[in-house]
């Protein structure tokens, strides 16, 4: 048989109320928030020198012409990636 102390503990545990959504909201609001991560490349100070160089016309971008592909959208990495895939498929290997 169990002792009276164990019975009292079991009764005490069963009397605990389940957490309500309001109480959960309160607990979460009191927690310390983690700072949001901003990638180093997205920070404004990283781009100031580049912006000045572009405005003064002192930029060099060495590129290699791959060809021409018509795209449906004008923005987005996925658009660029798909266009490069198409160019690589149709490109003729150099002699």
Image (spheres, rainbow, N blue to C red):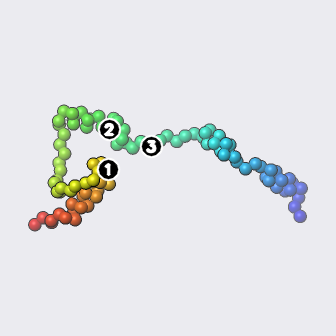
Residue identifier under label 2: 46
In the rendered view of the protein, which quadrant contains the N terminus? bottom right
Left or right position of 40 against 26: left
The image's mark for residue 76 is 1
Residue at coordinates 22% horizontally, 62% vertically from top-left? 88
Of callouts 3 and 1, the N-terminal one: 3
Q: Secondary structure at mark 1?
A: loop
Q: CA distance from mark 3 to mark 1?
A: 22 Å
**Residue nearest the observer in this picture, 77 or 61:** 77
Q: Secondary structure at mark 3?
A: loop
Quarter of the view holding residue 24: top right
Left or right position of 68 against 47: left
The image's mark for residue 27 is none
Query: Closer to us: mark 1 or mark 2?
Result: 1
Q: Label 1 neighbourhood size at 10 Å, few (<14), some (14-19), many (20+)?
A: few
Residue at coordinates 17% horizontally, 57% vertically from top-left? 67
Quarter of the view holding residue 44: top left
**Residue nearest the observer in this picture, 76 or 48:** 76
- Is the residue 49 above or below the residue 88 in the image? above
Quarter of the view holding residue 87: bottom left
**Residue nearest the observer in this picture, 79 or 27:** 79
Q: Label 2 neighbourhood size at 10 Å, few (<14), some (14-19), many (20+)?
A: few
Residue identifier under label 3: 37
């Amino acid at each position: 048989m169990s002792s009276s102390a164990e019975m009292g503990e079991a009764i005490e545990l069963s009397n605990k109320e389940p957490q309500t959504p309001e109480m959960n909201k309160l607990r979460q609001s009191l927690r310390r928030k983690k700072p949001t991560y901003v990638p180093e490349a997205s920070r404004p100070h990283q781009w100031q020198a580049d912006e000045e160089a572009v405005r003064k016309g002192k930029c060099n971008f060495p590129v290699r012409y791959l060809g021409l592909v018509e795209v449906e959208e004008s923005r987005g990495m996925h658009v660029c990636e798909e266009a490069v895939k198409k160019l690589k498929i149709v490109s003729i290997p150099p002699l």
